[in-house]
């Protein structure tokens, strides 16, 4: 954008230079007309004035044409600058919008990552609790089986003792102490069995609750993962769209610069040439064969600088 402004400034300078050149040529025309009154040995005064007028008309037409071309070029560049300004403003708005969306998506992604990490930790804890519960169930089952076997053995032993007591009534007093100890042991084992049964039932209920809650947690985890993937895809699409807009804008700027450079080259190649004026006492045939120099509006180094920009 800065190079375009500098180029427009240079064009304005060239325009002013051409106008000054035209004024100088007009003054020279007045002088030549004054000198044309003197009779030339090579031709009449009327012929000299006629040819001089033709040359000055050509010069004026060339200057007018150059001025018209410069004005048209200035208008075209002003139009291009307006278009570029509009495009730049749109790109800036798009960039700000994409930046806001990116920050929003990044924040959502951070929140989702934190929630996902927390849910993953909860899932790991539930899995660990599930494994601990399974191990506890196995331990309780083994204890229950052991208690059942002990009870069975105790019943068998009690039946055996009863049979022996019926056969040997005289040994009844000796077995009373043993029966009391056995009854205490049976009472203790039954109490332990009741407690273990209650614990087992409680663990079974907790396990059932965890199994009912597990599908819901898995569903929420899956939905969170899908949301994270969709946010990542949206972020990727937004980045790609921003890169495409930026490349398109850069290509448009390069194209305009190339068009301006080509126009400057064409203008330098096809620039109008100025015919040297015929002065009094000079042969007209010599002037007509003299090559016509090219008028440049301003320094040529400015054109090269403009093209480089």
Image: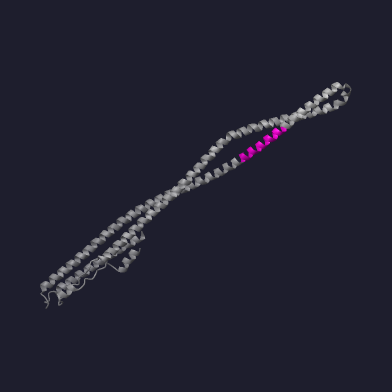
Dominant SS type (magenta): helix
Rendered view: 73 above or below 173:
below
- Magenta-tinted stretch: 125-143
Kindly give the residue lying farthest to the right in the view shown.
170
Q: Is 138 one of the magenta-colored residues? A: yes
Residue 250 visible here: yes
Residue 225 in percent (x, y) is at: 52, 42
Q: Quadrant of the C terminus?
A: bottom left
In which image quadrant can residue 122 be found? top right
Q: Is 224 one of the magenta-colored residues? A: no
Rendered view: 228 above or below 62:
above
Name the residue nearer the viewer: 289 or 68: 289
Name the residue nearer the viewer: 161 or 123: 161
Residue 1 in percent (x, y) is at: 36, 58
Residue occupying image coordinates x 35% and y 61%: 3
Residue 26 in percent (x, y) is at: 19, 69
Name the residue nearer the viewer: 93 or 224: 224
């Amino acid at each position: 954008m800065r190079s375009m402004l500098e180029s427009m400034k240079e064009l304005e300078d060239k325009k002013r230079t051409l106008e000054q050149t035209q004024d100088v040529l007009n003054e020279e025309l007045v002088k030549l007309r004054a000198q044309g009154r003197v009779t030339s040995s090579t031709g009449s005064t009327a012929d000299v004035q006629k040819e001089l007028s033709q040359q000055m008309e050509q010069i004026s037409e060339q200057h007018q044409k150059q001025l018209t071309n410069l004005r048209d070029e200035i208008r075209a560049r002003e139009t291009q600058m307006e278009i570029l300004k509009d495009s730049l403003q749109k790109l800036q708005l798009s960039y700000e919008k994409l930046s806001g969306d990116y920050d929003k998506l990044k924040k959502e992604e951070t929140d989702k990552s934190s929630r996902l990490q927390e849910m993953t930790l909860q899932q790991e804890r539930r899995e660990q609790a599930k494994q601990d519960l399974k191990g506890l169930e196995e331990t309780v089952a083994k204890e229950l089986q052991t208690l059942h076997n002990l009870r069975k053995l105790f019943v068998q032993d009690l039946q055996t003792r009863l049979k022996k007591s019926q056969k040997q009534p005289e040994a009844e007093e000796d077995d009373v102490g043993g029966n009391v100890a056995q009854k205490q042991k049976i009472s203790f084992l039954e109490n332990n069995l009741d407690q273990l049964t209650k614990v087992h039932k409680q663990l079974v209920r907790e396990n059932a609750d965890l199994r009912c809650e597990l599908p819901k947690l898995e569903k929420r985890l899956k939905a969170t993962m899908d949301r994270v993937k969709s946010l990542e895809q949206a972020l990727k699409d937004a980045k790609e769209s921003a890169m495409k807009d930026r490349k398109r804008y850069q290509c448009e700027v390069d194209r305009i610069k190339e068009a301006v450079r080509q126009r400057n080259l064409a203008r330098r190649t096809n620039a109008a040439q100025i015919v040297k004026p015929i002065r009094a006492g000079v042969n007209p045939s010599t002037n007509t064969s003299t090559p016509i120099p090219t008028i440049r509006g301003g320094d040529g180094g400015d054109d090269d600088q403009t093209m480089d920009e």
